[in-house]
Image: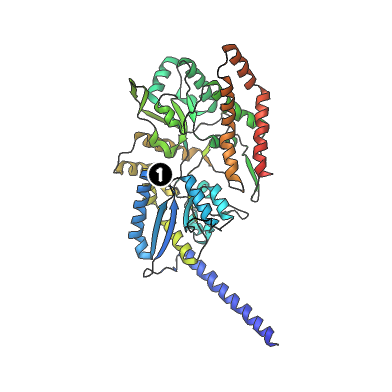
Amino acid sequence: MSQNRRKIQYMVIAYILIFSVLFLSGCGIISGNQSPLNPEEPVTIRLWHYYSGKNKEKFDQLVSLFNETEGIKKGIVIDAQSQGDVGRLAEAVYDAANQKIGSQPIPNIFAAYPDNAYRVDLVVPLVELETYFSKEELEEYRDEFLEEGRFGENNRLKIMPIAKSTENLFLNKTFWDEFAKDTGAKLEALSTWEGIIQTAEIYYEWSGGKAFLGIDGNANYMLVSASQLEEELFHYDQSKPKFNFDSQIAKIIWDSFYIPYLKGYFVKTGRFSSDDAKIGNVIAYIGSTAGAAYFPSEVTISENEVYPIEPEVLAYPKFKSGQASAVQQGAGMCIVESDLIHEYASAEFLKWFTMQDQNVSFSVSTAYFPVKKDSLREDLIMEAYEQEDEFLPVSIKASIKTTMQMFDEVYFYGYKPFEGSIYVRDILENHLISWVQRDQESLKGLSKEQKKQAVDKFLSEENFNSWYDSFLEEIREYLD
């Protein structure tokens, strides 16, 4: 045997041994039998998030608690920094991944929605969390929450859920009671979109032309509506999406959104519908459970007309012929690929943060919900609500009760990211409402007869088809 051949054999054996050691070490790490950390030489983990105000205060408290307890014991220091809001965080992480001039080094952990996590992963690989979380550990989380964090050709978990929200129908009960007393309107009607639109028309006539409802998340409305009608907008061939928006489904969505907005039954004048509720522009709105605290305690019609109100929080509505589903929201946490020690330490923090005590405490104080099955219990959450040091609005309590019932009855929808999905979501958010705003603008200054003729034209099949074709054309720029 030649010397070169023997040398090659030795190299192959050496590689096999090295691989075996690393593989067995990895198995030990996952099962918790050994740790690469050294408490005498703590590792610092840089974490970027988007929390602000009270949410940041609560998160910082928990990070300090970790650093002073588990962190000291294991040798981990979490350095958490807020980037201000979701949009700034997304851009800061993406700039760091691309090493843009002036950007900071990319953190070890960052909060992300699926769209941004996907585009960062194309530049800087994210850790496949199955590496550090065992099958048994992952089974503790609610299935839909984990599923939203899986993407890529192998559908691997790259976003760990840490707190989730959905959407409720928030209602000014005080004004509703007066309306219902005069008209016989029933709360049960608000469980379906058909009932909401019918009720909104009655309210419009009864109130002298005021809108009944506002919708905060237009993209959520379109995605969830399609899901309820059993026609999800995106179908996946491995990681490549196909857009599937049947004209019949599109017409139902159009009729339940465009038409009531155009007729004045729905309205949204600011960034959030809770702002419209504060001044009496609407008495109901579809909003995030994470924004439950912003439901107004009073309505100011004018300087001399200020009315205290009570909240009523109802489940997210569905179509009569559809299945019950609602959106799942709330950024998860991603770990950036680096080295064993930093990755392992990052995973240990996420495991700790999603344990029952701290996860329930964080969720309740921020109006989110915990992510593990054994933590999604009304008794635990309500107990934590009552124990909060600071006063929490009664609207949060009402939202908790309603949403806990939804967890038993509703499928929580989350769509998988793909290349360009961050731009596609922007189209879903803005295209249909911009069509409404364009047509509403053209009605200004018209006589009563001219307005009637214009509205008839806008409600025509021709106008729907124009919107539908335009919408498909914009979407397909990113998918074809």
- Above or below, 329 against 300 in this view is below
Report whether residue 159 is seen. Answer: no
* Tag 1: amino acid: Arg
Tag count: 1
Residue at 35% x, 41% y: name it.
Answer: 382
The answer to whether one can see residue 356 in this image is: yes
How is the rendered protein coloured? rainbow
- Seen from the viewer's position, the closer of residues 142 and 465 is 465
Q: Where is 288 relative to 60, above or below? A: above
Name the quadrant of the C terminus: top right
Which residue does the numbered mark 1 point to in the structure image? Answer: 377
Q: Which residue is located at x 65 percent, y 21 percent?
A: 460
Query: Which of 316/98 is in front?
Result: 98
Q: Position of residue 12 (x, y in %)?
A: 63, 78
Place residue 348 in its image quadrant: bottom left
Q: Is residue 380 left or right of residue 219?
A: left
Q: As rendered, which of 128 and 145 lies closer to the eye?
A: 128
Where residue 176 sits, quadrant-wise, is: top left
Q: Describe residue 478's horizontal placement relative to residue 426 as left or right.
A: right
Note whether 284 is above or below 116 in the view shown.
above
- Provide residue 437's location: percent of width, then percent of height: 56, 27
Q: Given the current orientation, which residue lies at the most extreme left position?
A: 389
